[in-house]
Image (cartoon, rainbow, N blue to C red):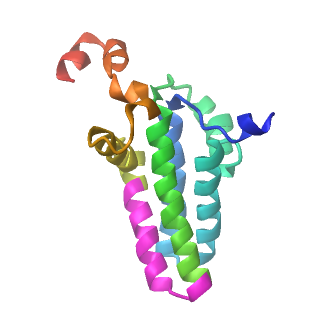
Amino acid sequence: MSRNELFSFPNPVNEVSARLVAGGVVSMAMLVLAAQQHWLIAPLAFGFVARVSTGPTLSPLGQLVTRVITPLLALEPRPVPGPPKRFAQGIGATLSLAAALAHFGFGATGAATVLVGLILVAASLEAFAGFCLGCWLFSRLMAAGLIPESVCESCADISDRLEALDPVEAQAA
């Protein structure tokens, strides 16, 4: 695997796997918050940094989901554009690194707890409702012209996704 392949993010992303990874993040965040297992902030941060850098390639959770759990479920893949998911992982990386710095660097466990709580909310929305908060923000930034359409051409043109829907779903969209 070349360096460029290693540090690339998949496009498209399987929405099924993305939601399962989010479920793993929910579990870790719950353990940090409910069981006071603050040491888990470090692997949580590593996972986000690994996923934003390489998709599932260097992420233990990403590997477990894409190589073991998703294939066991035998669900049809649901391809979605990669750039918004990478943006969402970047937000998770920022929040989890800030939580790690707050807790391990400054002993500010309260601040770390709030940051992990924000991660929990966003990951829960993705895992249980299929709503990617980071993806939504990405689309708003594209609509405002702050992210160029060239970053995600499939995000700007939804016709391919509408064609993939059955006629009832397409009318609802």
- Residue bounds of the magenta highlight: 105-122
- Name the residue rendered at 33%, 48% in the picture: 137
Q: Position of residue 143 (x, y in %)?
A: 27, 39
Count every numbered label the image shows and give the total.
0
Asked whether, in this view, residue 161 is left or right of residue 151, the answer is: left
Residue 46 in view in this figure: yes
Give the vertical position of 159 relative to 84 (above or below). Answer: above
Q: Position of residue 58 (x, y in %)?
A: 71, 47
Q: Is residue 141 magenta?
A: no
Q: Specify the quadrant that holds the C terminus.
A: top left
- Name the residue rendered at 68%, 35% in the picture: 67
Give the vertical position of 87 relative to 82 (above or below). Answer: below
Asked whether, in this view, residue 152 is left or right of residue 141, the answer is: right
Residue most toward the right?
1
Magenta segment main secondary structure: helix
Q: Specify the quadrant that holds the N terminus.
A: top right
Give the vertical position of 102 relative to 171 (above or below). Answer: below
Q: Position of residue 130 (x, y in %)?
A: 36, 41
Q: Is residue 106 magenta?
A: yes
- Name the residue rendered at 57%, 77% in the picture: 101
The image quarter containing residue 155 is top left
- Name the residue rendered at 53%, 66% in the picture: 96
Residue most toward the bottom?
107
